[in-house]
């Protein structure tokens, strides 16, 4: 397949899945403007590098990976900014939506989070998720079980505090 | 736990998607494409600026532009004039086929019938505060197979192109004047050869006007290589044949099917505003013949669909027009 064609396919995929990509980014950064930047920057990177995709079947997983990596970049950058400029940051007017359960995902590390989001929310196959994470299938499975365990504790914790 | 997980999933699905997201995604895609086309010849794109601009204020346009101009070689045959950053400068670059590498890039490809080539170009460049225009105006030459200039056809084609580009420049200059230095606008016009085979030479112009959002417009010129003449859609068909009806009906059908299959797709077919509806193909509609020999009809943004659909293209099955098409154009 020539690179022109691949670029078209990447573009199509971006335009049909930008909302999923946005939600995934959102679970990392938790605010609209960063999540939007991430989708834009990821789209840019994807089109720019579309010629590096060898097989059209991998476009989806490749895009997920770009979004996750970009999200992590943004998180790291934000952390640095916070430590350098903590005073200013307090006046920041980003809109943070109040989703308690989404915040529960914070208990998970970056890989665990991706596994939960992709497996349960986006209903992707485990093999696809393994491709996104560049892990083998068994490792991916154990990450899934581990994250479910962590989430269970977190989510039931919430239940108890509600009841008491 | 399952209940909790379902709740979590629901909250995830309820994460609101910002209205501007699709448009911004498109802009990023376009920006990446433009940078790809320019890459290797220019400095690194100022992506930082792109995203900062987009972030700064939702109501403010995210101007996709680079903040410096380079006086480096642009594309194969184009040398960009250096433009001052602060002062308003209009540069018209005229480049003749004198330089070895340029001559190479413009090397003509021998074909049957007429030979069409881009011989020179001019560039209208302007920058002042946040107003920016970058308009490329090619000059073409049509020759018969012995290499004799077909003067009439050549002049006709270049006049058309010039009239078209002048219109774009005039609109930009009018906006510039009206805004009195306060305007924010970027106009970009580029072109490419989309078809060059035995039958047809087609040059496609891409115009992007970026203000609050970006609007894309396309213009495609076709030269019949057997005759060297400019042709429009009707010239593909036998004299007097009704090609509009079958093509219109086919496009309507495609619109309906696409909308039925994907609810995110919208065309103005049976909309609340009847005057927007697509009812009939005009003869001046843009088209091109794909590599696989299929007729493609191109509609500018907003012509037959809301802006988020962008420029839309319909491939017409050759079957639809097989009885009226002239030989050799379509497969």
Image (tube, coloured by chain):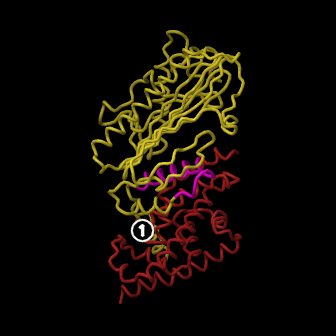
Chain colours: A red, B yellow
Position of the N terminus of chain A by quadrant = top right
Query: In this figure, which residue is indicated by the disc labeled 1?
Result: B11
Residue drawn at point x = 48 percent, y = 83 percent: A154
Magenta region includes residue B206:
no
Residue drawn at point x = 58 percent, y = 45 percent: B74
Dot 1: within a 10 Å radius of its alpha carbon, few (fewer than 14), some, or many (20 or more) residues? Answer: some
Residue drawn at point x = 50 percent, y = 84 percent: A153
Query: Is residue B177 depicted above or below A146 in this figure?
Result: above
Single out the residue that lies furthest toward the bottom: A164
Front-most of residues B193 and B82: B82
User: How many dots with numbers?
Assistant: 1
Image coordinates for residue B55, horizontal then vertical, percent:
40, 63
Image coordinates for residue B199, horizontal then vertical, percent:
65, 20
Residue drawn at point x = 58 percent, y = 14 percent: B323
Residue B214 seen: no
Front-most of residues A89 and B76: B76
Report the span colored magenta.
Answer: B20-45
């Amino acid at each position: 397949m020539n690179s022109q064609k691949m670029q078209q396919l990447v573009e199509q995929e971006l335009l049909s899945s930008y909302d999923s990509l946005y939600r995934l980014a959102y679970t990392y950064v938790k605010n609209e403007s960063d999540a939007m930047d991430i989708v834009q920057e990821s789209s840019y990177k994807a089109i720019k590098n579309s010629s590096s995709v060898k097989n059209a079947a991998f476009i989806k997983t490749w895009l997920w990976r770009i979004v996750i990596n970009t999200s992590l970049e943004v998180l790291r950058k934000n952390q640095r900014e916070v430590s350098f400029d903590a005073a200013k940051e307090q006046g920041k007017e980003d809109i943070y939506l109040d989703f308690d359960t989404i915040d529960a995902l914070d208990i998970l590390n970056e890989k665990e989070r991706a596994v939960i989001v992709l497996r349960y929310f986006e209903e992707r196959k485990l093999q696809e998720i393994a491709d996104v994470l560049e892990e083998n299938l068994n490792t991916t499975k154990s990450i899934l079980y581990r994250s479910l365990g962590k989430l269970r504790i977190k989510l039931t914790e919430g239940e108890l505090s509600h009841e008491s | 736990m399952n209940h909790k997980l379902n709740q979590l999933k629901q909250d995830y699905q309820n994460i609101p998607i910002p209205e501007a997201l699709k448009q911004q995604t498109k802009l990023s895609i376009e920006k990446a494409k433009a940078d790809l086309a320019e890459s290797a010849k220019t400095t690194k794109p100022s992506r930082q600026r792109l995203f900062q601009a987009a972030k700064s204020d939702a109501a403010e346009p995210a101007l996709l532009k680079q903040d410096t101009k380079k006086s480096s070689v642009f594309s194969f045959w184009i040398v960009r004039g250096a433009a001052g950053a602060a002062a308003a400068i209009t540069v018209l670059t005229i480049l003749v086929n004198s330089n070895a590498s340029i001559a190479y890039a413009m090397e003509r490809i021998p074909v049957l019938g007429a030979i069409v080539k881009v011989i020179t170009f001019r560039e209208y460049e302007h920058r002042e505060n946040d107003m920016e225009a970058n308009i490329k105006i090619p000059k073409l030459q049509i020759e018969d197979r012995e290499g004799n200039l077909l003067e009439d056809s050549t002049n006709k084609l270049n006049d058309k192109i010039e009239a078209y580009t002048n219109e774009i420049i005039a609109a930009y200059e009018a906006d510039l004047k009206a805004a009195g230095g306060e305007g924010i606008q970027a106009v970009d016009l580029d072109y490419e050869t989309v078809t060059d085979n035995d039958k047809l030479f087609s040059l496609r112009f891409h115009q992007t006007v970026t203000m609050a959002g970006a609007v894309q417009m396309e213009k495609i010129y076709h030269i019949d290589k057997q005759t060297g003449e400019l042709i429009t859609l009707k010239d593909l068909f036998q004299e007097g044949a009704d090609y509009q009806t079958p093509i219109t009906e086919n496009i309507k059908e495609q619109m309906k099917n696409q909308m039925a299959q994907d609810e995110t797709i919208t065309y103005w077919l049976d909309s609340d505003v009847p005057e927007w509806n697509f009812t009939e193909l005009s003869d001046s509609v843009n088209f091109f013949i794909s590599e696989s020999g299929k007729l493609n009809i191109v509609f500018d943004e907003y012509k037959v669909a809301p802006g988020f659909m962008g420029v839309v293209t319909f491939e017409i099955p050759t079957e639809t027009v097989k009885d009226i098409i002239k030989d050799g154009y379509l497969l």
